[in-house]
Image (cartoon, rainbow, N blue to C red):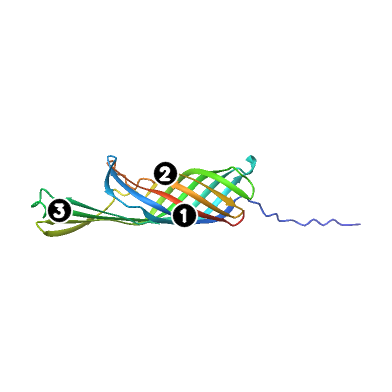
Amino acid sequence: MGMLLILPVCVMPQTNAILGMTGGAGISKLHYNTYNKPLYSFSEVWSTSTGITLEFPMHKIEDKGSFYNELVFFRFQSNATSHLDDTVGGTSGNSYYDYDLEFAPNIVSLAHMYRYTFTPGNFKYFVSAGIYNSFVISANNRKTVVHTVNGVPETSTEDAILDFAVHGLMITAGTGFIYKNVGFELRFDPGRNFTRTIDYSVYATTFSALLHVRFNP
């Protein structure tokens, strides 16, 4: 008489998530406005980003869409100077203010985007849009003021960005392609407001070129 032996089988759960990493560089410009008019003029500067990604393809629509998540470290350094004559505190031409602003934030950003692919297969051309929340973990936020009265300078420092906002939500959009496990993307970030002061708006617009690598495409 035979005996049937049934052994338990451990089945590993399958996941559709695609893990990867991203990194790139961009051009950022800090805008510092009061009542929609520029108060200080900042030049374009280089910005960098690097981080990890997690993507969830939507198989029900033939993999044309996916939910893309990104956790990155982002930084840039921006400076501006300004000279203003002091027509009240001393003689004209010999009394003035010199302003030197520095803003260099170190930011952790969490993005949630939707990607739509026009060419499913090994070569995928896509467009994407979504929201992100950025957290400033540290920053140089300094304004140095040199007030010269009748040729005698006096230096003081204060915050460059008043009532500084540590985090904030904003939208972003991009377009690019993925070939197997490597991708390239151009992205535009209009910039979220770095201040809670109603009279001011301080934001950094960024155009980025990003390289994506997927570990399990």
Q: Dot 2: few (<14), some (14–19), or many (≥20) neighbours within 10 Å?
A: some
For badge 2, the amino acid type reads Met
- Numbered disc 2: secondary structure: strand
Q: Dot 3: few (<14), some (14–19), or many (≥20) neighbours within 10 Å?
A: many
Q: In this view, does 116 lie to the left or right of 41?
A: right
Residue 26 position, x and y percent, is 43, 53
Q: Residue 96 carries which label?
A: 3
What residue is drawn where x is 38% and y is 49%? 167
For badge 3, the amino acid type reads Tyr
- Work out whether mark 2 precedes mark 3 in sequence or the reverse, and give the earlier one: 3
CA–CA distance in space, label 2 to label 1: 15 Å
CA–CA distance in space, label 1 to label 3: 43 Å
Q: Is residue 83 left or right of residue 93?
A: right
- Work out whether mark 2 precedes mark 1 in sequence or the reverse, and give the earlier one: 1
- Numbered disc 1: secondary structure: strand
Q: Which mark is residue 133?
A: none
Mark nearer the viewer, 2 or 3: 3
Residue 4 position, x and y percent, is 84, 56
Q: In this view, does 190 lie to the left or right of 140?
A: right
Mark nearer the viewer, 1 or 3: 3
Residue 59 image-quadrant placement = top right
Q: Dot 1: few (<14), some (14–19), or many (≥20) neighbours within 10 Å?
A: many
Q: Name the residue under label 2.
A: 170
What residue is drawn where x is 52% and y is 49%? 69
What residue is drawn where x is 19% and y is 57%? 156
Q: Mark 1 points at which residue?
A: 72
- Numbered disc 3: secondary structure: strand
Q: In this view, does 36 lie to the left or right of 49?
A: left
Label pair 1/3, CB-CB below 8 angstroms = no
For badge 1, the amino acid type reads Val
Residue 40 position, x and y percent, is 27, 49
